[in-house]
Image (tube, grey):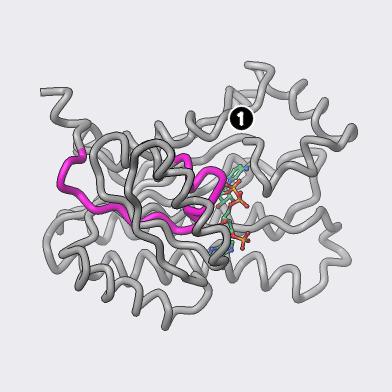
Amino acid sequence: MYREKNDLTGRVAFITGGGRGIGLASAEALAEAGARVIIADRDPGLLEQGRAALAAKGHDADAVLLDVTRSDEVERAAADCDARHGAVDILVVNAGIALPDHGAEDMPDEAWLRVIDVNLHGAFWCCRAFGRAMLGRGHGAIVTMGSMSGLISNRPQRQAHYNSSKAAVHHMTRSLAGEWAGRGVRVNAVAPTYVDTPMSAHSFDDPGLYPVWMENTPMGRPARGDEIASAVLFLASDAASAVTGTVLTVDCGYTIW
Ligand code: NDP
């Protein structure tokens, strides 16, 4: 029974920001569990790299060029995927950005708006378009990518825009979960700690940040992409059939202290 619950054979999964980092690791996890995966990203070169990385591990992925801040593009991608693949059963809302640290008192409008636009608006456009189709079919699983920074303000960084966007993603996740729970669609979030990806690489090299993070982490290390992907896989699968509206923290203990 438990093997079946984790088996995604016959399911179709769409992963935003799937060209690299945590999105690519999630695509690999879902593909390994049997899902047909579609990776979406805004850069064609990155998409090709992602596809090649999956192919090297024996997974044949589809790729879609998509900027999640464009609600019209998101609507079109959802309709195209339904037409080409029959249905999208699993949506991983992973695309996100972080900008350099900036004191809130001098935060430029553009920085605030950009981060909120990608991380929150983009996430909502995706949930709305793919969620609507899932509701029409009466089943589906959505996993959003939050952050431990949506739970804490995360000293010593100055990331009011990023932290606020991720807290909003958590609450959006719980709101949609509540609306859709009786209609067959589960919505959950994963809240990772630091993972060494292109997004965070510069912070890993910063002597003013990395040692402080590790000092504040009970397990004394960052997480790996595959460890975040395991949580995505669990929430996307029938192993989590009674789980909705949860924010699953995968943070090596960071938020304990
Ligand atoms: P990466 O930068 O490695 O990957 C993010 C991907 O999303 C990139 O391919 C990026 O493309 C893409 N993307 C960005 N903006 C858009 C957009 N408008 N439309 C479509 N795709 C877009 O970052 P991670 O893998 O580290 O991050 C993945 C998610 O995990 C994010 O939501 C992030 O906030 C979250 N997270 C990451 C943590 C970490 O420490 N790494 C910790 C906690 C949460 P492009 O290169 O063109 O920008």
- The residue beneath circle 1 is 255
**Quarter of the figure with residue 233:** top left
Give the residues in magenta. 8-25
Q: Is residue 106 left or right of residue 157?
A: right
Task: Work out which residue is located at the far bottom of the displayed protein and give it.
Answer: 72
How far from the left and from the top, in percent, is residue 67?
52, 72
Who's the residue at 24% across and 60% down the image? 88
Who's the residue at 74% across and 58% down the image? 99
Whether residue 12 appears in magenta in the rendering, the answer is: yes
In the depicted structure, whether residue 73 falls above or below residue 167: below
* Quadrant into which the C terminus falls: top right
Who's the residue at 63% across and 44% down the image? 149
Q: Is residue 144 left or right of residue 19?
A: left
Disc 1 residue type?
Thr
How far from the left and from the top, in percent, is residue 62?
34, 58
Q: Is residue 211 left or right of residue 24?
A: right
How far from the left and from the top, in percent, is residue 228?
48, 35
In the depicted structure, whether residue 140 falls above or below residue 226: below
In the depicted structure, whether residue 45 falls above or below residue 214: below
